[in-house]
C-alpha cells in the first residue's frame, strides 16, 4: 500500500477537546470505479476532497459510515475492539444502499497501518481514545437518480477526551411519539448517513424540553421501544435484562451484541423481545423496572436516570445513581476492552 507522509505534522491538542473536532495527520482512502473495483488504497495526509457540485452524494445521499475506536492499555499497547465486526456491518449497510462491497480484511489492514502511523495521536489519559470514522460516499458527477458507479472510501481519526470525566452520569431520555427514526423495510438497520439527518428534528425537540437524547418508538404502532439517538437500549425488569429484539428497524450495535453475550456469560438472564413503552412506564411506577442503560461505541454504557413520556418524568431509582447491573456491565466490558480482565471471547484486537 502506498503511504504518503505529511510534510507538516500538526500540533497535537492539549487540554479538553470537543468530540470530533480535531483530526490526526493522515487518512486512509480507496476509490471504486466500475472497471477497476476498489483500488488505489493509500494513506495520505489528512486533506479535503474536491467534488463536483453535481456529485450525487450532495443530492441523493448514497453514503454509509462506521464508528469505532483505538486506545492504549496500561502497558502502552494499542488495542481495538472487534474491528472486523465494523467492516462486516459496513458491508451489510453497503448491500442495502447499493454500494459495492469492500474487502473487509483489506480495509482493516489499511486501518491498522493508519493507526500505527498516527499512534502518537492516541490520547493516554484515563478513558481517552482515538475515535475512528470509516465512511463511503458516492461521487458520480451527474444529476438523475441512479445507483452510482464511482465511490470513495475513507477513514479519518479523531482524539477524544474521556466520555465520563466525572464518573458515569445518568442521562434523561425523551420518548418521541410523533417523529420516527426508522420503519421496517427502511434504512434503520443500517449505518446510513441519512438516518441521522432525519433524526435531528426530534433531537432538537428533546433538547429544548430539557432532555439529553431521544428514545425512539416503532414507526407503525408508536408502541414498542426501539433505541436511543446513537445507542441501543436495555432495561432491568425483576432482575432480568431485557432489550428490544432486532426487527429490522433497529441498528444492530456491536456493543449491544457484546453486552448480551457478556451478561449471559456472567449468569444474568438476558432476553431480546418486543418491549412496549407502557410496560416500561408501568414497571418504573411499580418498581419492577429498576435500571435502564444505552450501549454504543463512544460511551460503552450510558446509564439512564429519567424517561420523559407524554409530559411526565419517570425516574429510575433516584434518577441520579447508576444501577448495579448497569455498573457491572460497564465495568466488565471496559475491563475486557482495556486488557484488565481475561478476554474470554477473543474480542480485543492488538494493533
Ligand atoms: C452506531 C449506532 C449504534 C451503536 O452501535 P455500536 O456498534 O455499539 O457503536 C446504535 N444506534 C445507532 C442509531 C447507531 O448509529
Image (cartoon, helix red, strand yellow):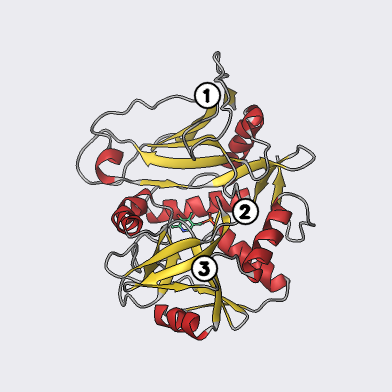
Quadrant of the frame with the C terminus: top right
Vertical comparison of 315 with 87: above or below? below
Asked if the beta carbon under badge 1 is closer than 8 A to the nearest atom of ligand 1, the reply is: no
Residue furthest to the left in view is 144
- Residue 42 visible from this viewpoint: no
- Residue 116 visible from this viewpoint: yes
- Label 1 sits on a secondary structure element that is strand
Residue 274, image x, y percentages: 46, 79
Residue furthest to the bottom in view is 286
Asked if the beta carbon under badge 3 is closer than 8 A to the nearest atom of ligand 1, the reply is: no
Mark 2 = which residue? 167
Name which quarter of the figure residue 347 lies in. bottom right
Q: What residue is at 26 percent from the left and 33 percent from the top?
A: 141
Vertical comparison of 222 with 186: above or below? below
In the image, 249 versus 304, the foreground residue is 304
In the image, 51 versus 195, the foreground residue is 195
- Work out whether mark 2 precedes mark 3 in sequence or the reverse, and give the earlier one: 2
Q: What residue is at 76 percent from the left and 37 percent from the top?
A: 76
Q: What residue is at 43 percent from the left and 53 percent from the top?
A: 191
Asked if the beta carbon under badge 2 is closer than 8 A to the nearest atom of ligand 1, the reply is: no
Vertical comparison of 190 with 108: above or below? below
Q: Which mark is residue 319?
A: 3
Mark 1 = which residue? 44
Q: Estimate how packed mark 2 is, as few (under 14), some (14 to 19) or many (20 or more) residues with alpha carbons within 10 Å.
A: few
In the image, 326 versus 197, the foreground residue is 326
Amino acid at each position: 500500500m502506498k503511504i504518503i507522509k505529511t510534510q507538516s505534522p500538526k500540533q497535537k491538542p492539549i487540554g479538553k477537546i470537543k468530540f470530533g473536532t480535531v483530526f490526526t495527520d493522515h487518512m486512509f482512502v480507496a476509490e471504486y470505479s466500475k472497471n477497476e473495483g476498489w483500488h488505489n488504497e493509500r494513506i495520505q495526509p489528512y486533506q479535503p476532497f474536491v467534488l463536483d457540485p453535481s456529485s450525487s452524494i450532495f443530492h441523493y445521499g448514497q453514503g454509509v459510515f462506521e464508528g469505532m475506536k483505538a486506545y492504549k492499555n496500561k502497558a502502552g499497547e494499542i488495542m481495538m475492539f472487534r474491528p472486523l465486526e465494523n467492516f462486516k456491518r459496513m458491508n451489510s449497510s453497503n448491500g442495502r444502499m447499493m454500494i459495492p462491497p469492500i474487502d473487509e480484511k483489506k480495509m482493516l489492514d489499511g486501518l491498522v497501518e493508519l493507526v500505527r502511523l498516527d499512534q502518537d495521536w492516541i490520547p493516554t489519559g484515563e478513558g481517552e481514545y482515538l475515535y475512528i470514522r470509516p465512511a463511503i460516499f458516492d461521487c458520480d458527477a451527474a444529476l438523475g437518480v441512479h445507483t452510482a458507479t464511482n465511490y470513495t472510501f475513507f477513514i479519518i481519526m479523531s482524539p477524544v477526551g474521556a466520555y465520563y470525566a466525572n464518573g458515569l452520569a445518568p442521562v434523561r431520555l425523551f420518548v418521541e411519539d410523533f417523529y420516527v427514526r426508522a420503519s421496517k423495510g427502511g434504512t434503520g438497520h443500517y449505518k446510513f448517513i441519512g438516518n441521522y439527518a432525519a433524526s435531528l428534528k426530534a433531537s432538537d425537540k428533546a433538547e429544548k424540553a430539557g432532555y439529553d437524547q431521544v428514545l425512539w418508538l416503532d414507526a407503525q404502532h408508536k408502541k414498542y421501544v426501539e433505541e436511543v439517538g446513537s445507542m441501543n437500549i436495555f432495561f432491568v425488569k425483576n432482575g432480568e435484562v431485557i432489550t428490544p429484539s432486532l426487527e429490522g428497524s433497529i441498528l444492530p450495535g456491536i456493543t449491544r451484541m457484546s453486552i448480551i453475550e457478556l451478561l449471559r456469560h456472567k449468569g444474568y438472564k438476558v432476553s431480546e423481545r418486543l418491549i412496549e413503552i407502557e410496560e416500561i412506564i408501568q414497571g418504573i411506577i411499580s418498581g419492577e423496572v429498576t435500571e435502564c442503560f444505552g450501549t454504543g461505541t463512544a460511551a460503552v454504557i450510558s446509564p439512564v436516570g429519567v424517561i420523559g413520556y407524554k409530559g411526565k418524568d419517570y425516574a429510575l431509582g433516584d434518577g441520579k445513581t447508576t444501577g448495579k447491573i448497569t455498573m457491572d456491565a460497564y465495568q466488565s466490558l471496559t475491563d475486557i476492552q482495556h486488557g484488565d480482565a481475561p478476554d474470554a471471547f477473543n474480542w480485543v484486537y492488538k494493533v
